[in-house]
Amino acid sequence: MICQSRASYAAGAGVAVAAAPLVYMLSLMWWIPDGAKYVPGIVGGAILLYGVFWRLPERDQGLKRKQWPFLLAAWAFVVVSAASYLLNDGSWSELRALLVMAVYISFFCGVRFRSGFFTAILLVCAAGFITLTFYQYSQTGGRVGGFINPIPYSTAVGAVVLVLLAMLLFANISLWQRVAFGAIFVPLVAALLMTKTRGVVGPVFVICAGLLFTLLMQNERRRFLKSLIVIAILASVAVVAGKTFLTDRLSQTANEYEALSEGNYDGSFGVRLQLWQASGELIARKPVMGYGNGYRDALEELHRTGNLKESLYRFEANHFHNQFIDTTVKKGLIGGLALVLLLIAAARMVYLAPGATWQRYGGLSVVLLYAGASLTDVPLLHSQTIFLFFGLCFLLSSANRRDNVEALSVRQPD
């Protein structure tokens, strides 16, 4: 009995060590400036501790087979990114983040985590985003971006919004739990709107509508009626908070659209369109391995030959405001294909993972959000959002199947 107890304690401690980097990525990393730079050390420490005290982690072979294609896709993207970095220079922080997550998943592939553990971490993450966002908004009264750019920060907040919504709609939880989680969901949606990021808020609400439609199509009348409160809350927050935080951005959108219709391409939308048009010629010139950071010299050449407008030349874009285009320009068609395969593999992994229904839909929502946000930004270029993407997808695919959020339930005595 004592041996069994010690074995159980050791197994639990080992899983806790394996989960430590994920806990950090979903909490403290966002609360401290430059929090992403500590992730490699935490991952290395977790692997070392596990290897010394628990040897190799126990693996669920069935889960490992489901995660294996994603791991291969991650390493393929790392190899392409490394080759581009060595040949043409590039972003070291991006390559380091991709490499760290590929190593982490390689070591802990097939390890199972308790569903209640993930639920608790999700709520901690949501509370952290709410606190940080409201604090910064109270200090500045303007667009909020955590300790990074508002756009990747918005992508991170939006991902947690979608996973929490999936729990509210599809998890088999009691009414009081649904109300309690809804109380966290409301300010989290407000926090998302405080980022004033149109390229993220739009996809989030489209995916939210898709989740609600999926619930309706399942014809589970009782669960749908319980979820009406969530629907009402989401609609109310969208109207009130949207009017409060997004009025200026909506006006800006209307003005930019009007300017485009008049042939003025100097606004935000116009500059993006020019970048995307210029990318076609750049890709055609170096289609295999791309330019890396040399794309700046290529844009300079286009400007000298009169193929680049002055407004775009002065904009000095750090990227092409589209993950697919940016990756293809910098890493060639091989890089663009590797990126698409990575997203497909992530969607496949979370869909086939033996988790609960809400975990499956939450994981798919995260992948869809990153794909949608990639149309106007580069979420897989920033270290923080790279860590969040890989961490959330891996954790959602590794959680034990548990439709009921037992860890937060109050058990009645027998």
Image (spheres, grey):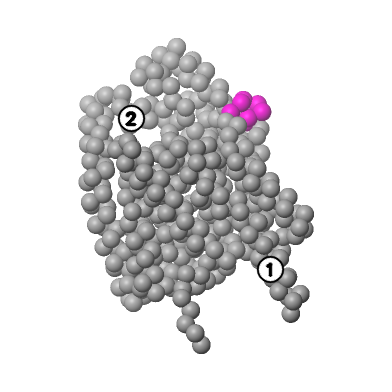
Q: Residue at x 47, y 56 (%)?
A: 124
Residue named by callout 1: 9
Residue in front for this viewpoint, 171 or 256: 171
Dot 2, crowdedness within 10 Å: few (<14), some or many (≥20)?
few
Q: Hey, what amino acid is under mark 2? A: Ser
Q: Which residues are the magenta region? A: 84-90
Most extreme residue toward the bottom is 414
Q: Is 85 above or below relative to 167?
A: above
Q: Nearer the viewer, residue 387 or 328?
A: 387
Residue 23 versus residue 411 in the image, above or below: above
Q: Tell me what residue is drawn at x 57 percent, y 66 percent.
A: 114
Q: Amino acid at mark 1?
A: Tyr
> Which residue is at 48% across, 44% downward?
31
Return the residue nearer the eye: 389 or 50. Answer: 50
Q: Residue at x 75, y 54 (%)?
A: 51
SS for dot 2: helix
